[in-house]
Amino acid sequence: MSIQTGSTAPQTGAHAVIADAVDPARRPDVLLRVRRAEGHEVSPWWMVGAFVGVSLAVVALLSFVPGGA
C-alpha cells in the first residue's frame, strides 16, 4: 500500500462538507416554520402577548373545573 504525495486529486472530508452545508433551520421540508428574510427577527412583545393570552385561557378554563376554593 503506497501513499501518493503529489496527487492532484481533490481533497475530501470536512472542506467539502462545510462548503456545501445548509442551515437546518432553512430546510424546505420542515413543517410549521415561517421562512423569513435573513436577519428578520420577531418582536419580543409577540412572545409576551402570547404568554399572557395562554395564561388567561388556562385560568378561564380552570374556572370551569368543580371543586375549586
Image: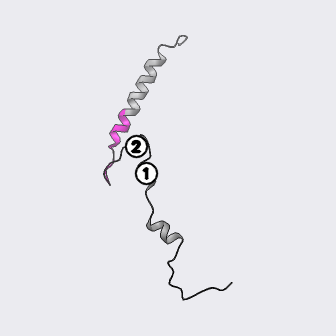
- Eyeballing the image, is 44 above or below 54? below
- State which quadrant residue 42 falls in: top left
- Eyeballing the image, is 46 above or below 5? above
How far across and down, in percent of the image, does residue 55 sit?
A: 43, 27
Q: Which residue of the protein is positioned furthest toward the bottom in this rendering? A: 6
Q: Residue 35 carries which label?
A: none
As helix, strand or loop, the secondary structure at mark 1 comes to helix
Spatial CA distance of label 2 from label 1 is 9 Å
Residue at the (40%, 52%) spot, across then down: 26
Q: Residue 33 carries which label?
A: 2
Give the magenta part as a residue range: 36-49
Q: Which mark is residue 25?
A: 1
User: Are discs 2 and 1 less than 8 Å apart at CB?
Assistant: yes
- Eyeballing the image, is 40 above or below 67? below
Q: Which residue of the protein is positioned furthest toward the top in this rendering? A: 66
Pick the residue in front: 57 or 10: 10
- Amino acid type at circle 1 is Ala
